Image (tube, rainbow, N blue to C red):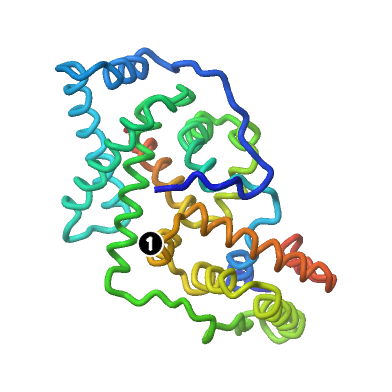
């Protein structure tokens, strides 16, 4: 299976692992990103975040935005 | 804004003890939470300035808009209101500014997505889509991949409710942003994601009944 097909299937089927909801993702996003940027195991601290970010494009964008803002020195 | 819908899955984050990570965060909370007066008002002005900068950053990162400044100001204003309302829920598990930024970034990204889809039709029918194999899969992989995609397509057509199918097709096959779809359907991102999550679980269960476990390992089937 090529990458394009795999990506399309992944979008349709979503993550296999258990995941948090959009609400929990938003509540925990700031702590998750600070842990990531500190090099800590953010997924261990907030289980299910990584799967949700794989499955929810909008929350993944918010995650990328906060990472980018903090990395830019905000 | 997000709803307070039930968790998508039985995974919830642990509730850490509340502790302020630094004196600056403690100061933000004290000043914003102070009764109305010059200290409170000055803190709100500083917060708004911070949020405008964050919203501008995000809107530029997403590609410049002709009305970037207008969207940034709207996003910062809405985020300021949300932060003041939710101040008691800040648990000090990150710097206050990191906690505050996420509200501005959310508002900016939602407004940008909605602006990009303004005036565009949001496809909600479940016709005209297909999971066809890509040519790049090559002749060797075609039979297995095509069989898998047919099984997924059949499952979408047969095991989902019409609402689940419309939501899944719009978000995952037609790239309609979930916030845009939520606005058109008069619901929330959280509620729609719950629908999407339930649909995905049904599809995976149906495929498993056929011995198909796509994406669990490379190759993925049988």
To which chain does the residue with label 1 belong?
Answer: B
* Number of residues whose C-alpha sits closer than 10 Å to that of mark 1, classed few (under 14), some (14–19) or many (20 or more): few
The one nearer the camera, A6 or B136, is A6
SS for dot 1: helix
Q: Position of residue A29 (x, y in %)?
A: 48, 38
Judge left or right: residue B36 versus residue A53: left
**Which quadrant of the structure image shows residue B82?**
top left
**Looking at the picture, does residue B112 appear above or below residue B58?**
below
Judge left or right: residue B179 versus residue B60: right
The one nearer the camera, B1 or B76, is B1
Image quadrant where one finds the C terminus of chain B: bottom right
The one nearer the camera, B154 or A73, is B154
Q: Position of residue B49 (x, y in %)?
A: 20, 34
Q: Residue at x 61, y 68 (%)?
A: A12
Residue matched to label 1 = B183
**Looking at the picture, does residue B129 appear above or below residue B12?**
below
Q: Position of residue B173 (x, y in %)?
A: 53, 73
**Which quadrant of the structure image shows residue B193?**
bottom right
**Looking at the picture, does residue A56 appear above or below residue B167?**
above
Q: How many marks?
A: 1
The one nearer the camera, A54 or B196, is B196
């Amino acid at each position: 299976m090529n990458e394009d097909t795999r990506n399309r299937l992944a979008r349709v089927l979503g993550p296999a692992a258990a995941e948090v909801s959009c609400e929990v993702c938003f509540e925990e996003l700031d702590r998750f990103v600070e842990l990531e940027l500190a090099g800590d195991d953010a997924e261990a601290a907030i289980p299910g975040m990584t799967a949700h970010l794989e499955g929810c494009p909008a929350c993944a964008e918010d995650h990328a935005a906060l990472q980018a803002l903090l990395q830019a020195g905000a | 804004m997000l709803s307070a819908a039930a968790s998508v899955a039985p995974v919830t984050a642990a509730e850490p003890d509340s502790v302020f990570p630094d004196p600056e965060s403690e100061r933000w909370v004290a000043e914003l939470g102070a009764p109305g007066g010059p200290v409170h008002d000055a803190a709100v002005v500083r917060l708004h300035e911070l949020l405008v900068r964050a919203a501008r950053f995000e809107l530029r990162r997403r590609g410049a808009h002709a009305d970037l400044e207008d969207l940034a100001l709207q996003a910062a204003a809405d985020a300021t209101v949300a932060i003041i309302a939710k101040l008691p829920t800040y648990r000090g598990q990150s710097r206050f500014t990191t906690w505050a930024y996420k509200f501005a970034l959310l508002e900016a990204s939602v407004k940008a997505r909605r602006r990009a889809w303004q005036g565009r039709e949001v496809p909600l029918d479940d016709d005209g889509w297909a999971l066809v194999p890509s040519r790049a899969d090559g002749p060797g992989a075609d039979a297995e991949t095509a069989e898998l995609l047919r099984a997924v397509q059949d499952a979408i057509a047969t095991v989902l409710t019409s609402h689940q199918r419309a939501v899944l097709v719009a978000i995952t096959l037609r790239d309609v942003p979930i916030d845009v779809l939520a606005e058109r359907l008069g619901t929330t991102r959280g509620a729609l994601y719950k629908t999407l999550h339930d649909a995905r679980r049904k599809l995976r269960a149906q495929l498993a009944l056929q011995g198909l476990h796509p994406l669990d390992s490379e190759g993925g089937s049988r």
